Image (cartoon, rainbow, N blue to C red):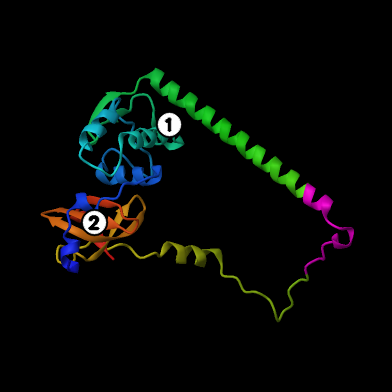
């Protein structure tokens, strides 16, 4: 098979089943950007959205229903999602259309779950710190006496070895001067060509597999195949 023929293989044949929650959420954010987000404040999801997902993706071999349930559980239990579940905010469907409004009891429940989750995380941090200190004390106690040397005071740098540091403002200027992405026009989006697909805040290198009007199917380096709009692509 010629290389050009291989690149024209249909998305179904090229699809690779994702296996971890992070990849599944990335895939959902690409398929339903008006509903799912990887950064910023997420929108509360419509009650019963799992069934909507199952119906929309019933012919998609990329994810299973079990994986969708797991991904939704992780997404809706994240701190940023619970913080966005506030009274008076409308839930959205897969297309971003607003629906039922969150009532006081739902908002109170989300806040309670958030507080419990943060408390558990704090307890885990404390346990890890205590474990690390205990391990450090054990290592120090087992260390031979001849190796227990007092720490020497670090010599102050002489004039000849003085390190010149850039002012903080200069560092900030360099950090903030990152190049901006340039939209890929139709002439740059060709089958087999390399483009950048922006998912969340991080652009990812992808290969164009198929072009149909304004819809473009691309494949990421991980093997995942995503169908997106041409205006979501940037020059590599």
Say few, some or many: other residues with alpha carbon within 10 Å of mark 2 (under 14 / 14 to 19 / 20 or more): many
- Could you say which is closer to the camera, residue 205 or residue 164? 205
Quadrant showing the C terminus: bottom left
Which of discs 2 and 1 lies nearer the camera? The answer is 2
Q: Tell me whether the residue at label 2 lies in contact with that at label 1, contact meaning CB atoms closer than 8 angstroms.
A: no
Instruction: Farthest residue to the bottom: give it.
Output: 160
Q: Is residue 76 visible?
A: yes
Range drawn in magenta:
138-154
The residue singled out by tag 2 in the image is 218
Could you give the CA–CA distance between mark 2 and mark 1, rounded to whole angstroms? 33 Å
Q: Residue at x 38, y 39 (%)?
A: 41
Q: Position of residue 225 (x, y in %)?
A: 26, 52
> What residue does disc 1 label?
82
Point out the residue furthest to the top here: 105
Residue 133's disc is none
Q: Looking at the rendering, which quadrant does residue 180 occupy?
A: bottom left
Helix, strand or loop status at disc 1: helix
Q: Secondary structure at mark 2?
A: strand
Kindly indicate the quadrant of the structure image that contains residue 97.
Answer: top left
Pick the front one: 89 or 210:
210
Residue 189 drawn at (x, y percent): 18, 63
**Sequence-wise first label, 2 or 1:** 1
Q: Residue 35: percent from the left, percent from the top?
A: 28, 38
The stretch drawn in magenta includes residue 151 = yes
- Residue 76 lies left or right of residue 29; in this view the side is right
169 in magenta: no
Residue at 33% from the left image edge and 36% from the top image edge: 68
Direction from residue 62 to residue 168 in the image, left or right = right
């Amino acid at each position: 098979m010629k290389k050009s023929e291989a690149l024209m293989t249909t998305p179904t044949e090229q699809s690779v089943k994702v296996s971890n929650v992070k990849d599944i959420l990335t895939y959902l954010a690409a398929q339903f950007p008006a509903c799912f987000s990887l950064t910023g404040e997420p929108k509360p999801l419509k009650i019963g959205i799992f069934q909507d997902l199952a119906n929309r993706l019933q012919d998609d071999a990329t994810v299973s229903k079990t994986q969708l349930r797991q991904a939704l559980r992780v997404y809706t239990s994240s701190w940023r999602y619970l913080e966005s579940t506030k009274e008076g905010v409308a839930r959205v469907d897969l297309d971003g259309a607003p629906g039922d409004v969150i009532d006081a009891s739902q908002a109170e429940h989300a806040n309670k779950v958030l507080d419990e989750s943060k408390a558990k995380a704090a307890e885990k941090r404390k346990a890890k710190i205590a474990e690390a200190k205990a391990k450090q004390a054990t290592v120090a106690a087992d260390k031979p006496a001849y190796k227990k040397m007092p720490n020497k005071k670090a010599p102050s740098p002489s004039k000849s070895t003085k390190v010149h540091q850039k002012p903080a403002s200069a560092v900030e200027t360099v950090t903030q001067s990152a190049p901006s992405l340039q939209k890929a026009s139709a002439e740059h989006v060709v089958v087999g060509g390399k483009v950048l697909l922006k998912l969340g805040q991080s652009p990812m290198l992808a290969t164009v597999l198929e072009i149909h009007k304004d819809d473009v199917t691309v494949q990421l380096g991980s093997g995942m195949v995503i169908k997106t709009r041409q205006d979501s692509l940037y020059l590599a």
